[in-house]
Image (cartoon, grey):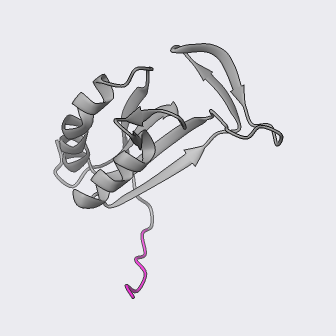
Amino acid sequence: MDTNENSILKIYASSTDKIGTDLLYEHIVVLAKKKSIAGITVYRGIMGFGLSNNEIETSRFWELTEKLPIVIEMIDKTQILENFYQFILNDLRLLPKGCLVTMHPIEIKFQKTGNKK
């Protein structure tokens, strides 16, 4: 394995999934920051379903709370993401509902860092 190889780690879950009292996506983002993951973004879907729920979840403007699909996406060196995945695996196993985790190698074509304030 090329030690400079980059990958993308994706976690598919629900916006209402929790680890203890914390929302799953917030928990993962905070841990990723502490572990110095290069970048992480959480996307909220407008409609979806998965194997752990027979219902199609959709965003409707009149609903007060929305249970929607989310994707937590991280990009970094492959080995760093593998280590992070192993670090959070027990938390993912404890989720009452299901989730899906994928990791794929990627080629970064362009990266420009901004000025830190």
Looking at the image, is 10 positioned above or below residue 39?
above
Percent x, y of residue 29: 37, 52
Q: Does 45 sit left or right of 41 as displayed?
A: right
Q: Is residue 112 magenta?
A: yes
Report if residue 25 lies within the magenta region. Answer: no
- Name the one closer to the observer, 20 or 88: 20
Give the x, y percent position of residue 68. 63, 34
Task: Please identify the quadrant where the C terminus is shown.
Answer: bottom left
Query: From this viewpoint, which residue is outermost toward the right?
Result: 62
Q: Does residue 20 appear to the left or right of 23 in the view shown? A: left
In the rendered view, tell whether residue 88 sits above or below residue 108: above
Name the dominant secondary structure of the magenta segment.
Answer: loop
Residue 50 position within the rendered picture, expressed as x and y whole percent measured from the top left: 56, 19
Q: Picture quarter containing residue 101?
A: top left
Q: Which residues are magenta?
A: 111-117
Q: Is residue 92 left or right of residue 72?
A: left
Image height check: is 8 above or below 4?
A: above
Q: How many marks?
A: 0
Residue 92: give x, y in percent of width and height. Answer: 32, 29
Q: 42 or 68, which lies in front?
A: 68
Taking the spot 37% from the left edge, 25% from the top edge, the residue there is: 95
Q: Who is closer to the viewer here, 45 or 64?
A: 64
Q: Residue at x 60, y 44 (%)?
A: 44
Quadrant in which the N terminus appears: top left
Q: Residue at point 66% right, 27% down?
A: 48
Task: Establish if 117 lies above or below 104.
Answer: below
Residue at 39% from the left image edge and 31% from the top image edge: 102
